Image (cartoon, grey):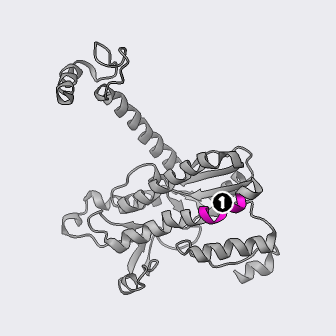
Amino acid sequence: MKKLEEEHENCLGLLCDVRARETVHQAIDRTIQCFGRIDIIANCAGYGVIGSCEDQDEYDIRDQFETNFTGTLNIIQLSLPHFRERRAGRYLIFSSTSGALGVPGLGPYCASKYAVEGLMESMLYEVDGFNIKATLVEPGHMRRDDPGDLVSAELVPPSSSDGVHHLSSPLPLYGHFLVKPPSDPYSTPTAPAAHAKRMLMWLADKQPASAVKAAYLVWQLGHCSYPPLRLVLGTYAVESIRDRLKCIIEEIEDWKYLSFPTGDPQTSGGGGGGGGGGPSAGPARETASQDQE
């Protein structure tokens, strides 16, 4: 970081742990003191563990939520006063395709990213009158632009609040994720909980998107007058999210006849109910009606 500061006069290197509000507050204040204002805040801090929902313990889950969700919340809460005062500002929050669909083996990680997506979308409604913009960057698997292998040596993940658990139990790093050793029920080669690891291996062979190219696109996005709420990067990411949304729409249409009546004679009861799944929908409607009575 010191080298970058020496090469670029507009570079200020600061340490910031997004889980600790005080360090976030200090980074924001120091930046304003140095440059006079903040125009764009990009948050790419993230942490994930591969392992079944049953196998991941309290510390694994807490670390993922504190880094991915609470860290984002800390940044927003401590920077919004500055943005509101200036009536301008922009957030570029790195989410993931895991914030739009569930991935076996990444349950808590997906949950933390879902939470970030809900947080940012809700926040945008609240600050609409202050000319504050935000974009959730949803990349697929990103290729590290270095010669490192997919499988790395053991790495100690962010420590928990007690500073003990993870320091004594380092986990191996696989791609961008730490790997939790599976318990017996989830240890078979074809176990769904191992899907995330298999997916990383498959994507590595597909030449995933470059992190450098993604960073350049995000830089351009920072200068866009009307940025999107979500920017999906990579062919795999686009196809995965599009298929997921298509499935959601189809499922809604297939089951909408079971929705509670609204009092509208055209939609409640009678012979309507269009997308109810054909001839089999009739008995199902009768059963649902009896259950409601």
Quarter holding the C terminus is top left
Residue under pointer 1: 80
Camera-nearest residue between 29 and 213: 29
Residue 77 on the magenta segment:
yes
Camera-nearest residue between 149 and 101: 101
* 35, above or below 192, in the image: below
Q: Tell me where residue 93 sits by quadrant.
A: bottom right
274 lies left or right of 220: left
Instruction: Name which residue lies at 38% across and 78% down.
Output: 171
Q: Position of residue 32 (x, y in %)?
A: 76, 70
* 54, above or below 100, in the image: below
Instruction: Name which residue lies at 76% across and 79% down.
Output: 5
Magenta highlight range: 76-83
> Does the rendering let one see residue 233?
no
Instruction: Name which residue lies at 74% across and 64% down.
Output: 38
Q: Tell me where residue 36 sits by quadrant.
A: bottom right
* 37, above or below 3, in the image: above
The mark tally for this picture is 1
- Kindly state the secondary structure of the residue where label 1 is placed: helix
User: Majority secondary structure of the magenta segment?
Assistant: helix
Quarter holding the N terminus is bottom right
Instruction: Name which residue lies at 70% across and 43% down.
Output: 226
19 lies left or right of 248: right
Q: Position of residue 292 (x, y in %)?
A: 21, 29
Camera-nearest residue between 8 and 40: 40
Residue 55 on the magenta segment:
no
> Does the rendering let one see residue 190?
yes
Callout 1 amino acid: Leu
